[in-house]
Image (cartoon, grey):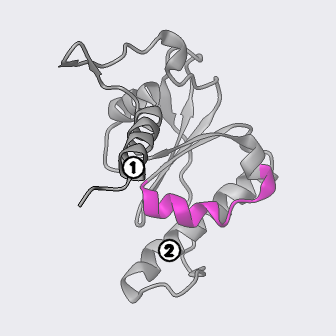
Amino acid sequence: MARPARYGAHRLRRAEATRAIVPRIFKEGRLFRRARSKENFMQLPHGTHVAVADGNRFVMFRNDGDEAVINLVDAASPEVETTNRSGANPEVRDLGGRGHAAGVAALLNKQVLDNDIEKLLIIADPNTLGVMRSHYHSELAKRLVGELPKTLTNADTAAIEKAITAA
């Protein structure tokens, strides 16, 4: 029994679509990585605040360096109120982390609205970042320089600077 003529055409279209979507990672049979140019690295403007958070901890930094050379110094990290536990059907084990993330977002919203923060970069683990995004004020979203979905609350300042530069 012969296969329909469309069988081969379908597989060919699928292969062409896959080649168009998936970037090439092999060149001449060897795995290669494209070199990143200097423009691709994140540049953090002078005076930008960096908020590093996860479900339990929150730390603020400020960039005292210029755009090319990041120099993070400790900024005031006030206490976070964790009573806001809003969200659609949160699990019991997630309530503390969700409340902390919502509290961090509320604190950042207040500081932005009081004009204490002009530019802001947020570094948080993906779950915390997702909860925080739902609590952003529109003014905070305007002043947001970027977001990094990484867990760096227990990392030292040099590791945080390196992660920002590599982003």
Q: Does the magenta stretch include residue 7?
A: no
**Disc marking residue 125:** none
Q: In this view, does 82 lie to the left or right of 120?
A: left
Dominant SS type (magenta): helix
Label 2: few (<14), some or many (≥20) within 10 Å?
many
Camera-near label (2 vs 1) is 1
Judge whether 156 appears above or below 35 on screen.
below
Circle 2: residue type: Arg
Task: Specify the quadrant of the image occupied by residue 127.
Answer: bottom left
**Disc marking residue 5:** 1
Point 40% across, 30% down: residue: 23
Q: Which residue lies furthest to the left in this view?
A: 30
Circle 1: residue type: Ala
Expressed as whole percent of the image width and height from the top left, the position of residue 43 reads 56, 22
Label 2: which secondary element: helix
The answer, for residue 99, to whether it is visible in the render is yes
Label 1: which secondary element: helix
**Disc marking residue 98:** 2
In the foreground, 37 or 115: 37
Expressed as whole percent of the image width and height from the top left, the position of residue 6 reads 42, 51
Point 48% across, 23% down: residue: 71
Question: Which region shows up in magenta?
Answer: 125-139
Point 30% across, 56% down: residue: 3
Task: Specify the quadrant of the image occupied by residue 83.
Answer: bottom right
Expressed as whole percent of the image width and height from the top left, the position of residue 16 reads 43, 35
The answer, for residue 79, to whether it is visible in the render is no
Tell me the distance, in whole angstroms, between the alpha carbons under discs 2 and 1.
Answer: 55 Å
